[in-house]
Amino acid sequence: MLYASKCTTGLYINSISCVLTPDTVLPGFYMLSSAHLVPTSVRLAPSWIRSSSRSFMDLKALLSSLNDFASLSFAESWDNVGLLVEPSPPHTVNTLFLTNDLTEEVMEEALQKKADLILSYHPPIFRAMKHITWKTWKERLVIRALENRVAIYSPHTAYDAAPQGVNNWLAKGLGTCTTRPIHPSKAPNCPTEGTHRLEFSVNHNQDLDKVMSTVKGIGDVSVTSFAARCDDEEQTWISLNCTQKALMQMLAFLSQNRQLHQKTEILSLEKPLLLDTGMGRLCTLDESVSLATMIERIKQHLKLSHLRLALGVGKTVESPVKVVALCAGSGGSILQGVEADLYLTGEMSHHDVLDAASKGINVILCEHSNTERGFLSDLQQMLGVHLENKVNIILSETDRDPLHVV
């Protein structure tokens, strides 16, 4: 047996296995004795061998990097995102496989291409599974992933909301425009502690001492105070950031000591909105174009020969389009009530289309995943840079929308 022989050129031949006999001659070697092989020439190894020189990433490190790229906190509360299937640790990733939908056909392709991690935009596991058997196709996906030590990760609506995500990619097909989220995302945490702010004024120093003593005993409260003048009287203004439980305790104290304070205000603290992050996009074109021109732009961007169009009441294909509201996938709930010349999405209910058209809004439907899948090419490039080319990133060739025009 012969393993990992280093040639004089510095290239490595990985895991050559053979049985040597007096008559054995290996390609590129000549026989000096039964114990030594001398290279006469070096040929480049096949791609599957050369790929072993690419760096690996530990699964947990890779997941952390993916979250840095687009935080899972952006995802909708109803969604099922993140790591869905995990082989027993440790698990390293050399090949990251991208797909919009993980079907059995796509799984077979991923296994053939030696994927270690499948990033499936849509989560193949959404509802709870009560058993894992060979009975249904989604259960079979889990079985095959675990048997072949392949992890499965889904970002879904986290990538919809991300500034560099699916909806921004969809907007690129419209032409030069400014965009903003229709429903902005909120930061995962408040910049300050607590969920409420309680503010009131105290007239006298002895009262202030009593208040501050009570605050210290409650806990979960951050307090600031500053001097103020009201009606020519010196006062101290108290501002407390606190949890809801601490708020109730403070209110009980203040209600029992009404003489201590004045002008009480309660504010509910909300998480701040995130710039350029959120569901859907409202796009304002720099220059209006006809609906016919917009249709051709969308077809070209999505590489579609056909799409579905509902004309708004009183509109024609020559009507101008200036404002487009869009949402990749199923956009009915996101687009509802938004003022625009055109709604662009994958699918909407029949009655949502009727409602939009009655308001003079044109509707273009492209089928659900046709408004998402093209983003994966951009994602492949962005992740390559973000992950510093430490893993091999490949796109599925069998992934496609299940619906087509016949």
Image (spheres, rainbow, N blue to C red):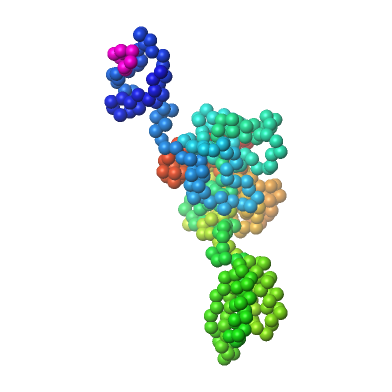
Q: Quadrant of the C terminus?
A: top right
Q: Where 226 falls versus 406 (above or below)?
A: below
Question: Relative to the observer, which residue lies in front, 110 or 86?
Answer: 86
Quarter residue 10 falls in:
top left
x, y (%) of residue 206? 60, 85
Q: Where 352 falls versus 196 (above or below)?
A: above
The answer to whether 29 appears left or right of 95 in the picture is: left
x, y (%) of residue 304? 55, 39
The answer to whether 39 appears left or right of 309 in the picture is: left
Residue 64 drawn in magenta: no
Question: Relative to the observer, which residue lies in front, 283 or 133?
Answer: 133
Q: Residue at coordinates 62% horizontally, 39% vertically from top-left?
A: 124
Residue 30 drawn in magenta: yes
The answer to whether 250 appears left or right of 273 in the picture is: right
Q: Residue furthest top?
A: 23
Q: Quadrant of the N terminus?
A: top left
Question: Relative to the observer, which residue lies in front, 329 or 78?
Answer: 78
Magenta-highlighted stretch: main secondary structure? strand
Q: Residue at coordinates 55% horizontally, 33% vertically from top-left?
A: 149
Q: Residue at coordinates 51% horizontally, 53% vertically from top-left?
A: 163
x, y (%) of residue 397? 52, 32
- Confirm whether residue 326 shows in the render: no
Q: Count up the numbered dots.
A: 0
x, y (%) of residue 164? 49, 50
- Confirm whether residue 273 shows in the render: yes
Quarter residue 360 falls in:
bottom right
Per the rendered image, the range of residues in magenta is 29-37
Q: Residue at coordinates 68% horizontally, 29% vertically from top-left?
A: 134
Quarter residue 131 falls in:
top right
